[in-house]
Image (cartoon, coloured by chain):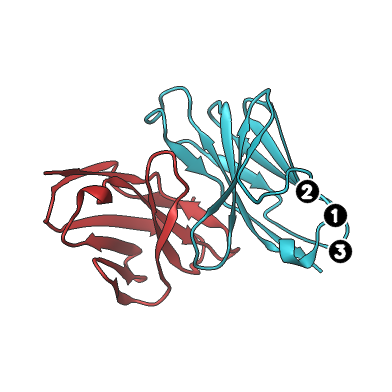
Amino acid sequence: GAVVSQHPSRVICKSGTSVKIECRSLDFQATTMFWYRQFPKQSLMLMATSNEGSKATYEQGVEKDKFLINHASLTLSTLTVTSAHPEDSSFYICSARDQEGQGETDTQYFGPGTRLTVL
Amino acid sequence: GQNIDQPTEMTATEGAIVQINCTYQTSGFNGLFWYQQHAGEAPTFLSYNVLDGLEEKGRFSSFLSRSKGYSYLLLKELQMKDSASYLCAVMDSNYQLIWGAGTKLIIKP
């Protein structure tokens, strides 16, 4: 089946630094990728929808200048948490939509997540 | 390798009961999650099992057997709004989520 990877799997950084998280679709092309944030035992909170070659669409309440998204190719989207603070510590999950019919057109494949800890 | 298996699609009748199975093979185990996802929406958390047994929450129940690498989600008194995809995910020893492909549940009147 379709595979989505994330890198790094976990990162610890100091407050004020920036962290980049990569999301890759390994065996399919994804014109649309999604970035989620998850708190323990809670629903995934959609942060933004990333479209290849265009600007990301952010959900209400998500600061676009703080969470920079770049979707430069059909297999890679990146989320950069700029000037990270302890409250940004969370589990970040990406997903990619398979556009070429491996599943249904709205099938999403989820990445394993990136655990960010800001000290 | 790590693997999560769940049926691709299931059909059930309104008012009935349906059981969605999930089997897994992962490197370590730190809990199993069930999510509900309606088309175009973010997954909604339904349950988390880390110990063997049945967890009941209203119309939804989730069961886990770690020795068998098996879980199921039981939905009772099905309603039309329960039509959705149901995702099984296991957190492995590195606290990474391994996702199943999801089960599309179709509810018929």
For label 2, the SS is: loop
Residue type at numbered disc 1:
Ser
Of the pair B86 and B66, the residue shown nearer to us: B86
| Residue with the mark numbered 3 | A14
Q: Residues within 10 Å of mark 1 (few under 14, many from 20)?
A: some
Write the residue at 11% across / 44% down. Answer: B109
Q: Which numbered circle lies on residue A66?
A: 2
Task: Look at discs 3 and 2 and give the one toward the viewer.
Answer: 2
Q: Chain of mark 3?
A: A
Counting from the top left corner in percent of width and height, residue B86 is at: 34, 51
Q: Chain of mark 1?
A: A
Q: Are marks 3 and 2 on the same chain?
A: yes
Left or right placement of residue B87 versus residue A20 in this view: left
| Residue with the mark numbered 1 | A83
Write the residue at 86% across / 63% down. Answer: A15
The red chain is B
For label 1, the SS is: loop
Disc on the earlier residue, 1 or 2: 2
Q: Are marks 1 and 2 in contact (CB under 8 Å)?
A: yes
